[in-house]
């Protein structure tokens, strides 16, 4: 049986030009050494971004799918890149109703390209609004 010993791989230091978060427009932390233990927490964790979605209208609004029920709105993570070792930052979320979220994550009515376009359009509308809502001076401040 192979045991995973994450603490052992401490010789690895992230370079200054780390591309930890390719989706985010934020400056990458320079020269930071990530401790294995700290990284157990999901990279890009941002509770504020998630809670901002509560009580919002659905931003995905998939034709013929959207239930339009604000009560069911949850943060939908952009699901591109999963399975490629990338983690989706919480900031990359849009409010989506239950049915749109399910279709976006598991549905097959839309192609990947359509989903991507839909998410990007939704995010473009949502991000500036969320920034105002949370009092963020610029996109990318936690
Ligand atoms: Zn919807």
Image: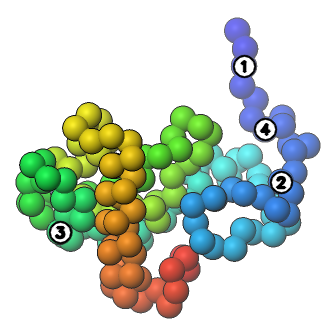
Q: Which residue is mark 4?
A: 7
Q: Which residue is mark 1?
A: 3
Q: Which residue is mark 3?
A: 57
Of the two numbered discs 1 and 3 on the same chain, state the one appearing first in sequence.
1
Q: Which mark is residue 61?
A: none
Disc 3 crowd, CA 10 A, few/some/many (<14, 14-19, 20+): some
| Label 1 residue SS | loop
Q: Is residue 66 left or right of residue 9?
A: left
CA–CA distance in space, label 2 to label 4: 15 Å
Residue extending furthest top? 1
CA–CA distance in space, label 1 to label 4: 12 Å
| Label 4 residue SS | helix
Q: Which residue is mark 2?
A: 14
CB under 8 Å between discs 2 and 4: no
Q: Is residue 49 visible?
A: yes
**Residue 110: x, y in percent?**
27, 42
| Label 2 residue SS | loop
What residue sits 69% from the left and 73% below the top?
A: 27
């Amino acid at each position: 049986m192979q045991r995973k010993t994450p603490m052992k791989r401490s010789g690895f230091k992230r370079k200054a030009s780390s591309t930890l978060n390719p989706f985010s427009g934020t400056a990458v932390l320079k020269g930071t050494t990530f401790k294995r233990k700290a990284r157990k927490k999901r990279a890009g964790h941002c509770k504020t971004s998630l809670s901002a979605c509560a009580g919002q209208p659905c931003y995905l609004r998939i034709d013929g799918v959207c239930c339009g029920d604000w009560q069911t709105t949850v943060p939908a993570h952009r699901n591109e890149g999963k399975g490629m070792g990338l983690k989706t930052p919480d900031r990359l979320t849009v409010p989506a109703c239950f049915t749109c979220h399910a279709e976006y994550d598991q549905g097959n009515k839309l192609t990947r390209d359509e989903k991507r376009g839909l998410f990007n359009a939704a995010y473009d509308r949502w991000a500036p609004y969320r920034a105002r809502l949370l009092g963020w001076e610029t996109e990318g401040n936690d």
